Image (spheres, grey):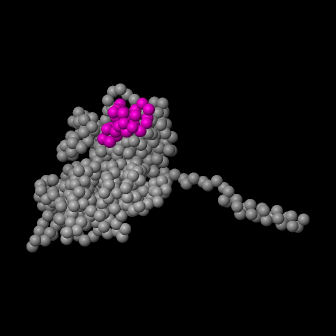
Amino acid sequence: MKLRINVLVAFAVLGMALLPSCKKEQPTPKEVTPIMEKALNDSTSIWYADFKRFPQKDQRAYLPIGVFDSGTGGLTVLEAILGSDNVDNISGEVKSDGIPDFSGEDFQYLADQANMPYGTYPKEGKEMYLRELAVKDALFLLSDKYYELSSDKVAKGNKAKCKIIVIACNTATAYGLKDIETLLELSKTGVKVIGVINAGVRAAFDDIKNSRTRDSLSVGVMATIGTISSGAYERTIREVQKAQDYKGYVQVVNQPGAGFAEAVDLEKDFVDLSLAAPRDSYRGPKLGTGEDDIKEELLDVYNFDFSNNAILYKKENGKYIDFQLNSAGNYARFHVVSLLERLRATKEQAPLKSIILGCTHYPFYLDTIKKVITELREYKKNGKFVYAPLISDDFTFIDPAKFTALECCKILREEHLMALRTRRGNVDAFISVPSYGVDNSNLEENGALKHDFKYGREIGTEEVTTVVVPFSRRNLNPDNLRRLEVLVPITFSNIKDKLD
């Protein structure tokens, strides 16, 4: 009897010991940031979204597709979407049928120009504010209002709400995708969101698997400082490598593109076409010996364009004492050479199979970037090729935009949300500008937010420092408009008649 009791006690003790491991694992609670809390639950807040009034799924097919970026660079993603023909429109099979995949779809595009560059927020210790900006961008696309003029105190314009959100910005994807996913999940609207990073990484691995030399390769990532510092691309590359059980060695070479996106958008602290001499306010790369500096000994490798003040410099006794990049093309040259120099400094020096253009602004200068790669292949020092051994024979560029377009089409077809109109689709483009309430002391001469004010703002407030208005010739640089007309012609043809 005593033995039986002892056995029963032993089993009871064993059961108690095992009990915690038998419990169902609890899911990690979703983080709800202040802006999300206001959007979801605070009906007194200006950020309240009132998701209960969001159109039901059977009413959404003819709503627009929403796309946002920190500036005009994301128009490269919209262009890829508008021009994509990857799917048979009748069968849904992945093959071209001569008809645009999004024929008849309406679009809304938001360029958060007033708050860019996004990549600077993490560097300034403002990662949470960047996350809040990404959520606000999504909330605008999910809303039905916009400001007609920056001087308006309330949003008077009416627009449609969006049925799906595409984050065309790599930095916003890296820092804001999870928050937007959480917001949409808690909103119970069923709206989906797509980020550009995963699409680009999957394309890079498809390229690697088709390579003639698969044992040891490098993937270059050119992106903003914020995107690189987030680790999002490298983390996603390792996740995809594990998921696909790829056994080859993949080296990731990250190149933070300081100033490149800003130069494309003609931000005056990085590019000022009116200048002929260096200025104190310059924030781009400078001459030096650090990893992120312009190296004087590499000037013949960069092969910078000095015409039309594309380089601003001072010399004394034949030596540069000041040297500033003053064209987006020269920023492109500096960052491509710097990426190859990073690869050359690694122990493995695995050949570069591809470069992921991890910022939507970079495809605007793809011709220049390609030209630099060609020059580097041919560059010799003391009769020897310096960079050619580092570049794979079947090297390619990966633009995540076209793969994002394919993913967007796939989701809309699966959700039965394609518009399937016979008429041509419509594009409404919006841009953020400083609001009427911002004191003049916080504005630059050109009306932009001053750096210290922009990166000094706090999260979770009701303060409105920027408002969203339609694209117009008043809020778009003429040089920028000419560039858009050439580089995103489908998009430009859709918006040009609306520019006042």
Between 252 and 350, the residue placed more toward the observer is 350
Q: Is residue 188 above or below residue 454?
A: above
The stretch of residues the image draws in magenta is: 79-107
Q: Which x, y percent locates residue 409? A: 41, 38
Reply yes or no: does residue 313 show up in magenta: no
Q: Residue furthest left?
A: 317
- Quadrant of the rendering where the N terminus is positioned: bottom right
Q: Is residue 474 above or below residue 452?
A: above
Q: Is residue 195 visible?
A: yes
Q: How many marks?
A: 0
The residue depicted at 20 percent of the width and 69 percent of the height is: 383
Q: Is residue 108 above or below residue 423?
A: below
Q: Is residue 466 left or right of residue 24?
A: left
Q: Which x, y percent locates residue 301? A: 20, 64
Q: Is residue 21 left or right of residue 85?
A: right
Q: Which x, y percent locates residue 471? A: 26, 40
The residue depicted at 37 percent of the width and 42 percent of the height is: 405
The residue depicted at 45 percent of the width and 39 percent of the height is: 411
Q: Which x, y percent locates residue 46? A: 40, 43
- Name the chief secondary structure element in magenta: loop
The residue depicted at 25 percent of the width and 57 percent of the height is: 373
Between 225 and 179, the residue placed more toward the observer is 225
Q: Is residue 313 left or right of residue 462?
A: left
Q: Residue furthest top?
A: 422
Reply yes or no: does residue 85 show up in magenta: yes
- Quadrant of the rendering where the C terminus is positioned: top left
The image quarter in which residue 328 lies: bottom left
